[in-house]
Image: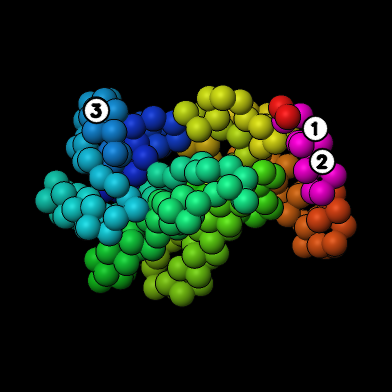
Amino acid sequence: MQIKNKRVVVTGAASGIGKALSVAFYEAGAQSVVAVDMNLEGAQDTANDVNGLAVEANVGQETDIIKVVDKANELSGGIDIFCSNAGIGGVHGFMDVKTEDWQNIWEVNVMSHIYAARNVLPQMLERGEGYLMSTASAAGLLTQIGSAGYSVTKAAAVSFAEWIKISYGSKGIGVSCLCPQAVRTAMTAGGPGVAGIDGMIEPEEAAKDVLDAIEKDRFLVTPHAEVLEYVKRKGTDRDRWISGMQRLQERFEEMMPS
């Protein structure tokens, strides 16, 4: 799908990848950009940069997603590209993670994509054209050392994006899923952790790769090229892959303060 003159919604737009995506769409000639975030002040700053509209929303609540869709429809008569980008790192570990923490990360990292698709697909299917972009993580293709919640929810996000592409790709719906390793955002401000093994990239680099994927209708967006090689190794010999990750887990535990 060509970006020029398209009507775009970006969640998690106050900073990081979401802000970089908003600016990239604007610079590529998008007709309109709706910047969505729980941080309304940050979303407004982004909207000011792209001559767009700021909307405050908790993407883990379907009522808020419906509000976003309604506001975008009011602004420009429809949505061509919906970037479900917002996500959280959640509580690390497993044994000490409370049920409410699991529910929270599930709502934001998984249900937000489901709510977006459920509420924007009808208009796209009616037009016979539309694009859904979801931000997951390399953790969704591989795993996340030290964080069960993040690993599980990002894997679910990738799986849902694949299902949408399989189910609606022949009906004019494009789907891309962003799966980077460490990106310089608020989430990695304290350090990239194990995810930074192949280097930290800037949000603008991830955004550039996303726009290229949308224009080429490419499903998997992996700004860190190494990720694809890791996925191949995992698929070829799962037991060997798990053994390697167990060794990485041991290294991670050694680095952590006691």
- Which residue range is magenta in the image? 245-256
Describe residue 216's horizontal placement relative to residue 229 as left or right. Answer: left
Cα separation, mark 2 vs mark 1, equals 6 Å
Image disc number at residue 250: 2
Element at badge 3? helix
Check residue 253 for magenta coloring.
yes
Amino acid type of the residue tagged 3 in the rendering: Glu
Q: Is residue 128 above or below residue 180?
A: below
Amino acid type of the residue tagged 1 in the rendering: Glu
Amino acid type of the residue tagged 2 in the rendering: Glu
- Residue depicted at x 71% and y 27%: 257
Q: Position of residue 14 (x, y in %)?
A: 34, 32
Camera-side mark, 3 or 1: 1
Quarter assignment of residue 226: top right
- Residue depicted at x 27% and y 69%: 122
Quarter assignment of residue 182: top right
Mark 1 nearby-residue class (10 Å; few <14, some 14–19, many ≥20): few
User: Of the residues under marks 3 and 1, which one precedes in the sequence?
Assistant: 3
Q: Position of residue 31 (x, y in %)?
A: 24, 42
What residue sits right under mark 3 in the picture?
Answer: 41
Q: Position of residue 208 (x, y in %)?
A: 49, 36
Image disc number at residue 254: 1
The quadrant of the picture occupied by the C terminus is: top right
- Residue depicted at x 24% and y 27%: 41
Q: Position of residue 163 (x, y in %)?
A: 50, 70
Element at badge 2? helix
User: Of the residues under marks 2 and 3, which one precedes in the sequence?
Assistant: 3
